[in-house]
Amino acid sequence: MTTTATFLQRCHRALTEIHRLTPQLTSQLPGKPLHPHRPRSLTTSPASTALTTSFSQPLPEVAPRTRLTPLSPSYYTGSPEYYDNLLALQDLLRSHEALPTIHGDEAPEVQWKTIDEYRLIIGDRVKPSRYNKVIRILDRLNRIDPAIMPAETKAALLLYTRPRNPELKRRVERTVDNFGRAYAIGRRKTAVARVFLVEGEGQTLVNGLPIIKKFSRIHDRESVLWPLVVTNRADKYNVFAVVKGGGKTGQAEACTLAIARALRIHEPALKHALREAGCITVDHRQVERKKPGHLKARKMPAWVKR
Amino acid sequence: MVPPILWRCLRMPHIIHPLKPRLCLHNFTTTPPFSAKPLKPKGPPTSSKMNPGKQRMQSNKVHVKKKPILVQKPAYEVGQRKELRKRIVLSNTNAIPVVLPTMTADLIGNEDAAGAMFALPSGEGDTIVDRLRALEAFQTKQHWPFFYRPCTLFRRETVEVGRLLERVVKWEAAGEDGRVNERAILHGYYGCGRSILLLQAMTWALQKEWIVIAIPNAQDLVIGHTEYEFEGSSHLWLQKASTTDLLNRVLKANRKALKGMKLSQSYRLGRIDEVRKGDSMERVLETAVLDPLLAWDAFNVLLGELGLPGSPPALFTLDNLNQISIPSKYRDQAFNAIHSHDLALPNAFLAYLSGKRGFHKGVILAATSSKCSRTLALDAALECREVDPYERLDPRIGPSIEGAQIIRVDSLSKEEAKGLMDYYNQSGIMKDPVDIATFNEKYAVSAGNPRDLFGTCLRMRQ
Amino acid sequence: MVNLYGVQVAENQLVHKALRSFFGIGHSVADRICAKFSIHKTARISQLTQPKVTAITLEMTKMVIDTELKRKIADNVIRLKDIGTYRGKRHALGLPVRGQKTKKQIVCARRFNRLRTNI
């Protein structure tokens, strides 16, 4: 008898807590029959119908069951609160999947709640991988075209966004200075390139030398000018670069990054094209240090018997 | 990755050049090759029952076959590989012919022609290309084998080189007395086309029937690969083999002009041979070519005669000037490195370049090279730049090029690059037709350098 | 075949290489001999004139090379032995002379550090 009593208690707790934690979510779910998995709901209590369905359209009356069933379909998953939340979000996404989306670069900038804040919502431990799953869905929802974003989605996303802290310093927007120069820095290996980009007729000076004198390999020159070449602007900008440290390849590719960044200051719309060309991604790899006991970074001396 | 040149083979009918060796390519095929021997018809099967004894005898005896001793032929004959390496192919019948005007002598110093491509004269009965080849004006790595016929770009620098020739031509036409010597050094970055400018100057000079003396690669004179010998009277080291080669080239290229040159006085060649007044210069050189001992004297006779009034104009060129501004690989008797300027041939050239000696009418052209390392003294003299006061510079380099005009060979301008790229396009080098975006890209990546421009046109983007 | 310092040398051999075939003439000495007679790097024996070959031979006779050099070295070793030095003893034993360890790897010493009286 005791077991039955505890089960009843837990059912009740789940019922009330879920209601407390995700009231908006559950209330905003669309009224139509949701998906084929929905009937696996095990509950018999009348409160559960009110919880999982819209207020406007009550579910048809179901003959009350005699056996007690858990309220949440995720009852046996171990963390029912999280899974209820996830399923609700997945339902929301599924219902809006067909809506047109925009590119991730153009989507409105939002900061999702951190994993700790999310844990507070759920009221339980959440693994980072599970948190990431939720964030992925939220990102996808955020990419729905803002012009036709449904109100319910907007409201749902609002739940998970962090409030903007006005005291935090906002990122300074880089602009072209009054001489028409865009300035940017790029790094690769141990080289650092500082680039001034101005509109011009396609001349390039690296450390005060014509590019052909600085980079005698065609490949290096191609690397340097890649952002301009790939956006078809090789004859529209003049480059003045100061690059130090590293070797030829590092210097050339540091210039690539710096030029790409400077070009984005001139023409922010090129971001997508430059990303496709691989000019924006920072290659932060460095030479791995040599360790004592090793011949190189990882190489061990040959094994000798005794 | 298939190079773009090969795609053209699909379009062009495959013509096999009769003189070129055929490249043997084995395509995948399931049919037997024609050269394979036909299968032998099977004879009557040898029955073991018919002669059982024989078979037993065979099985008992260990049959040892004597292998014939094979004398392996070397893959290449002596000198064959060098010949292959140095062979210059000037035409490619697989390339698409491009109709271009010929680079004639009346284009000398013509500014309007700058930016256009011109073909070297190679019509019927025109031997200019052969004569240039004899002078070794073409080099192996100048991408000639990609095109149907040798063509060159007329550049701003070509106009400047043409001006030098033009001045001499005008002087000659005016019939004025007195000497006129135009001296210039072509200098620039690697692959900027200095050797091609020399080639263009030679083309014009040969068409004008000047005497062209060309040292195609100064490196050959200083790396210590030919014999040398001290000559006491002039304190110079003679290189008889090299001088013979040079005279041979001069003779082959300028036979007609040399035939017309008559000696103004008698000379003594070597100890015994003598050439009389009124003999043709051709005879002198023919004698000298056969006997290396006479070569240096004959060369001096040639230079001396060219300095006298009434002689034809001369063009004296030397490629890779840097190589003779570093110590040579030759050693004197005390095992000191011989200064390149003490070698007779470089010394003679530099005497003309610095104006110590002169032709009656002539142009002296030198081209620098980017392949020679550490020629600080020469660079300082050419570029007139500040040098480290603690640097020990060779004091003989500066005066050796003093007074010569320095022609800076720059990158191609956009118009020139466009002309060159259109030519590449028409010759079928490039896969796609050139649009403005492609042109801008190639021009920016190559930075207007002709050698790199060809490289970027030929290769595909990664 | 050309007779150079009493040895028959193939015609197509490089002069520099032919000189180096004598004990006591290495790269640097061969370079110096070539420089003295103005012989370039790629010269072959066949390209030398007879007076030059004679001159080279004469030059070589003035130098201590070949058998003479070997005998000189042997004499030095014998002298060390005779005056009873440690080095002389080590030579006689065929062991390393200059303080190397003898636990292992003394093949070269065994080969070279021997008393050779009759050369």
Image (spheres, coloured by chain):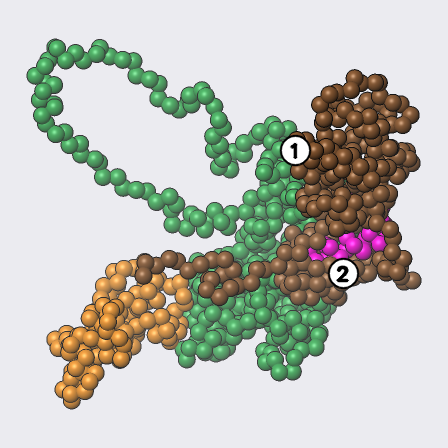
* Front residue of this view, candidates A101 and B440: A101
Colour of chain B in the rendered structure image: green
Tell me if mark 1 has few (under 14), some (14-19) or many (20+) residues whose alpha carbon lies within 10 angstroms of its own: few
What residue type is disc 1 on? Thr
Q: Residue at the location (61% across, 80% down)? A: B391
The residue indicated by pointer 1 is A3
Q: Is residue C99 above or below residue A217?
A: below
User: Please, what secondary structure does the residue beneath circle 2 have?
Assistant: strand
Position of B165 compared to C83: left or right? Answer: right
Quadrant including the C terminus of chain A: bottom left
Residue positioned most to the front: A1
The residue indicated by pointer 2 is A185
x, y percent for residue A237: 82, 54
Residue C94 visible in the displayed image: yes
In this picture, which residue range is highlighted in magenta? A252-275
Q: Chain of mark 1?
A: A
Q: Main secondary structure of the magenta part?
A: helix
The answer to which of marks 1 and 2 sits earlier in the sequence is: 1
Position of C13 compared to A208: left or right? Answer: left
- Which mark is drawn over residue A70? none
Quadrant including the N terminus of chain A: top right
x, y percent for residue A63: 79, 17
Q: Residue at the location (20% across, 71% down)? A: C110
Q: Which chain is orange?
A: C
Q: Chain of mark 2?
A: A
Colour of chain A in the rendered structure image: brown
Residue A199 visible in the displayed image: no
Query: Does the stretch in magenta take in C4?
Result: no
